[in-house]
Image (cartoon, rainbow, N blue to C red):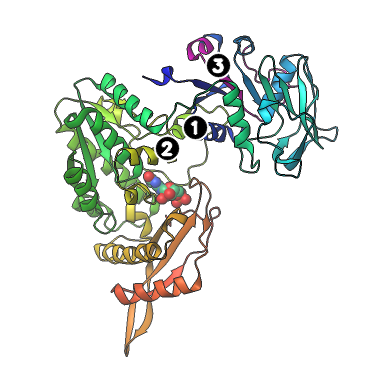
Amino acid sequence: MNTADHDRLLIIDFGSQVTQLIARRLRELNVYCEIHPFQNVTDAFLTEFAPKAIIFSGGPDSVMREGSPRPPRKAYEMGVPILGICYGQQVMMQDLGGKVEAGEHATAEFGRAYVTPTETRSDLLAGWFMDGTGREQVWMSHGDHVSEIAPGFDVLGTSPGAPFAITADTERRFYAVQFHPEVHHTPNGKTLYQNFVQLAGFTGDWTMGAYREEAIRKIKEQVGNKRVICGLSGGVDSSVAAALLHDAIGDQLTCVFVDHGLLRLNEGEEVVAMFRDHMNLQVIHAQEQELFLGELDGVSDPETKRKIIGRLFIDVFQKYANQIEGAEFLAQGTLYPDVIESVSFSGGPSVTIKSHHNVGGLPEKMGLKLVEPLRELFKDEVRELGRELGLPDSFIGRHPFPGPGLAIRCPGEITREKLEILRKADAVYIDQIRKHGLYDEIWQAFVAILPVRTVGVMGDGRTYDYACALRAVTSVDGMTADYYPFSHDFLGETATRIINEVKGINRVTYDITSKPPGTIEWE
Ligand code: XMP
């Protein structure tokens, strides 16, 4: 079975900021869907994709602008249900003979709004308007609005700024809403999607078990009897990719784990023990601490550190990979959001804040073909797949850890002494967080060792040791973040433990900067 054997839903992306959330809601309903930018959706594409239903996303454009994005006419002629959202509603109305007006005439609406029903018998609204208030909270974000609905449509719900908030042509199974049911601020939005996919006849056949079977079959088909190399970082994505590949092709897979000497306490040994000893993967533990720390000696500029680590990582990876005879494939843990971003038509290049270290150019450089078994998954689906593959929860739920490791948590010059102190302090901090049951509430927590020594007093003696900063943030995707509001009791207890248990630190501070203006890491 492959994805083509599942019921497939097509989301035509008109550039809304929240299109990915539509896909999330549908995946939660066990519906297989793909997002494609409107430019790519041609008649031929529609025939090949053969969707069982289509959703038109929102978007920033105005349907009244000449040349604004449209779906192909064929979308309406396939006999499949369509749901239009916001811009998608306006497109549908205009395409099918209705009218849209610009927002100047008083009906632009942004933010929370309340929809009341004019017709509740529609299957699209099953489970709506049931809480006794007679209305539903929805999230609006539109300038233009529909001023005349297309022939064949009925109005099912209205809001003060959108007389045609919910519209339906039941016969053709075309539905269109002015608000965004996919966002959190439309609390009952998921029900609307559920009703839509039910109307369209989806059976909810997209499960992780099915995905795993299918992914294994695809990997076997792609790789045949050739060898595959996988860079293991200890992070969730590469770990799940490796476990999945191992399930599919066993010993044809060799993993390379590069230890650059910038890992956390016992991390290298733990990762290798888990994959090699417990899961029986072939793992090369590239012990290159001397090389990395040697080249970083005396370097304190953050970008220079990152560049050195990135360059050495590629060199080292290549060196070990070259020893694996007959390797033709390189496995990568690319996720669906990376894939969508790379075809996004609205996103321009953004300023480089930090040069992220990755192995982007490696496959071409080494003449290897790519295997990307997680390309269709979101992060939380990767975690679910990891569980399905038997990776321990403690591993799957781990906070993200950056490629350059502790180097960017050690502002100023990196020395072995500082790294040693940092590792111990970090271990105490994380232990505290786990003991207080806070680990899963926090996106990322770590210690940074500061390039200053401060005076303290312990017992009867003077100390002159390093200061450190604790960092903990909440975040959804790492793009923005808030500092975590620990209690003062927690902070006090943690500071005492670090100073008592870690020789070399005599002062602890808590970093209360959010992102922006700060970044999560210190460098
Ligand atoms: P910043 O510090 O930019 O970090 O707010 C955002 C997220 O990205 C992680 N990060 C990296 N991850 N290679 C990575 O794989 C890198 O070079 C890198 N730099 C930052 C950081 O830990 C946070 O989760």
- Judged left or right of residue 363, residue 13 is right
Visible in this render: residue 17?
no
- Judged left or right of residue 311, residue 181 is right
Task: Name the residue beneath numbered marker 2.
Answer: 381
Q: Residue at x 26, y 43 (%)?
A: 312
SS at mark 1 in the image: helix
If you read the primary sequence from the N terminus, does the residue marked by circle 1 or circle 3 appear first? Answer: 1
Q: Nearer the viewer, residue 410 or 505?
A: 505
Looking at the rendered image, the disc whose residue lies closer to the viewer, 2 or 3, is 2
Asked if labels 3 and 1 touch by Cβ distance under 8 angstroms, the answer is: no
Task: Name the residue beneath numbered marker 3.
Answer: 41
Distance Cα–Cα, label 2 vs label 3: 26 Å
Asked if labels 2 and 1 touch by Cβ distance under 8 angstroms, the answer is: yes
Q: Which mark is residue 72?
A: none
If you read the primary sequence from the N terminus, does the residue marked by circle 2 or circle 3 appear first? Answer: 3
For disc 2, the neighbor class at 10 Å (few under 14, some 14 to 19, many from 20) is some
Q: Residue at x 26, y 25 (%)?
A: 368
Distance Cα–Cα, label 1 vs label 2: 9 Å
Task: Name the residue beneath numbered marker 1.
Answer: 27
Visible in this render: residue 9?
yes
For disc 1, the neighbor class at 10 Å (few under 14, some 14 to 19, many from 20) is some
The amino acid type, in three-letter code, at marker 2 is Glu
Q: Quadrant of residue 434?
A: bottom left
Main secondary structure found in the magenta portion: loop
Q: Nearer the viewer, residue 95 or 454?
A: 95
The location of residue 107, given as percent across then percent down, is: 82, 35
Q: Which residues are magenta?
A: 45-72
